[in-house]
Image (cartoon, rainbow, N blue to C red):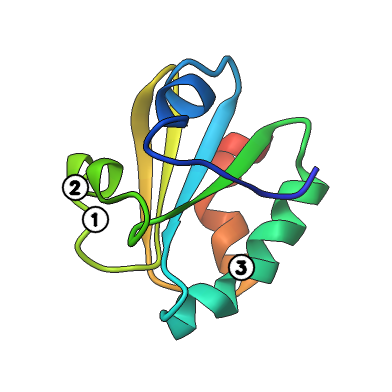
Amino acid sequence: MSTRDVTDATFEAEVLNSEKTIMVDFWAEWCGPCRAVSPILDAIATEHSDKIDIVKLNVDDNPETAMKYQITSIPAMKVFKGGQVVKTVIGAKPKPALEADLADYLK
């Protein structure tokens, strides 16, 4: 399964109430590093779909959720488990570095 979009309206149901570990990619269309990391996240989502779901939230279209989680620079990725943030990754990184950051959740 590749990544999917969430919104302010669907965030609680799809992320906070999920039984599964979810990584939220906070991004915007005008953000070059966000576009660079997007295919990497798609690959991780596909390769590790049994362990983690990756969703994308456009901060321009969904300012309420972005403000709630104090997103001040993008790309920002937050890992949620049981409705709580358990890990934050800021900035675009190559796939091996992102997989290392997520190692605890990809086992």
Name the side, left or right, on which 35 lies relative to 91.
right
Q: Quadrant of the C terminus?
A: top right
Q: Nearer the viewer, mark 1 or mark 2?
A: 2
Q: Residue at x 37, y 56 (%)?
A: 61
Amino acid type at mark 1: Ile
Q: Is residue 40 above or below residue 51?
A: below
Residue at label 3?
38
SS for callout 2: helix
Amino acid type at mark 3: Ser
Residue 67 numbered tag: 2
Residue 48's spot in the image, x, y percent?
76, 42
Tell me if residue 93 can be seen: no
Q: How many marks?
A: 3
Asked whether 57 or 84 is in front, the reply is: 57
SS for callout 3: helix
Q: Quadrant of the N terminus?
A: top right
Residue at label 1?
71
Structural distance between the alpha carbons of marks 2 and 3: 22 Å
Name the side, left or right, on which 67 lies relative to 19.
left
Structural distance between the alpha carbons of marks 3 and 1: 17 Å
Q: Residue 91's image quarter?
A: bottom left
Q: Residue at x 40, y 67 (%)?
A: 75
Residue 84's spot in the image, x, y percent?
34, 24
Tell me if residue 99 can be seen: yes
- Sequence order check: which comes first, mark 3 or mark 1? 3
Amino acid type at mark 2: Met
